[in-house]
Amino acid sequence: MALKLLLQGEHTSPEGRSRFEREAKAISRLRHPNIVAVHEVGEYEGQPFFTMDFIDGLPLSKFARRVKIDSQVVIADLCATIADAVQYAHEQGVIHRDLKPDNILMTANGVPVITDFGLAKELDSMTMLSMTGEVMGTPAFMPPEQASGRTSETDQRSDVYSLGAILYWLLTSHEPFEGKSMVETLTLVVHEDPPLPTRVNPAVSGD
């Protein structure tokens, strides 16, 4: 079992507390073998917390480098498993909004588990945790509408874009956009198309 607390504790801003509580609320109702399960949500001496399954594994970012996944069939199967879990979350009304290799843990058996719903948005909620114009997420795996701060436009398609970016990274060992700074990367995401995977890695099949 793992315990998650707010890093700043009682000094956390109202926005940070709201984001933490939203994460707990969003994932506490998700029950899927490829999504980390939350068991208890509460508060102790003013400190919000929630408990969740402890996943004994590595982030996909480290796992892929250590194991060196060369088979494109294995990569496709892995991404399909992750996509099924994301679809389940969408069916429950939850968008992740920060899908990336660091937020997917790989167990010792090679099973992916999605974690960190800290930027999750509920489809039926009228409350946004980030105001329009505030960029939230990880630039290289972020869809254009999110990269340009149009957070109110994020929906299921935003997660689908990020899944595509993860597939791109697994196939090429490169992020779709690699600017010299966060601002440059965000600009590329909004205004450019990524290089074709076959240009980055000629071994990538047409399929």
Image: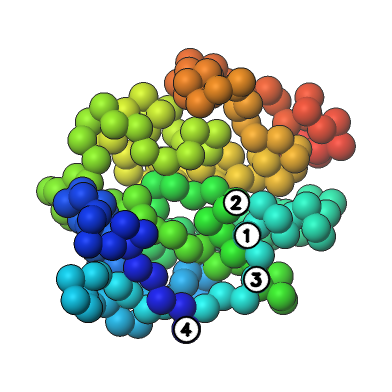
Pointers 2 and 4 in contact (CB under 8 A)?
no
- Secondary structure under tag 1 reads strand
Q: Identify the image quadrant of residue 153.
A: top left
Which of the labelled discs sits on residue 41, or is there none?
Answer: none
Amino acid type, label 3: Gly
Badge 3: how crowded within 10 Å, few (<14), some, or many (20+)? some
Amino acid type, label 4: Met
Task: Establish if 132 lies above or below 171.
Answer: above
Amino acid type, label 2: Pro
Residue 77 visible in this rendered orientation of the protein: yes
Task: Establish if 174 lies above or below 166.
Answer: above
- Secondary structure under tag 2 reads helix
Which of the labelled discs sits on residue 57, or is there none?
Answer: 3
Judging by the rendered image, the residue that carries numbered circle 4 is: 1
Which of the labelled discs sits on residue 59, or is there none?
Answer: 1
Q: CA distance from mark 1 to mark 2?
A: 6 Å
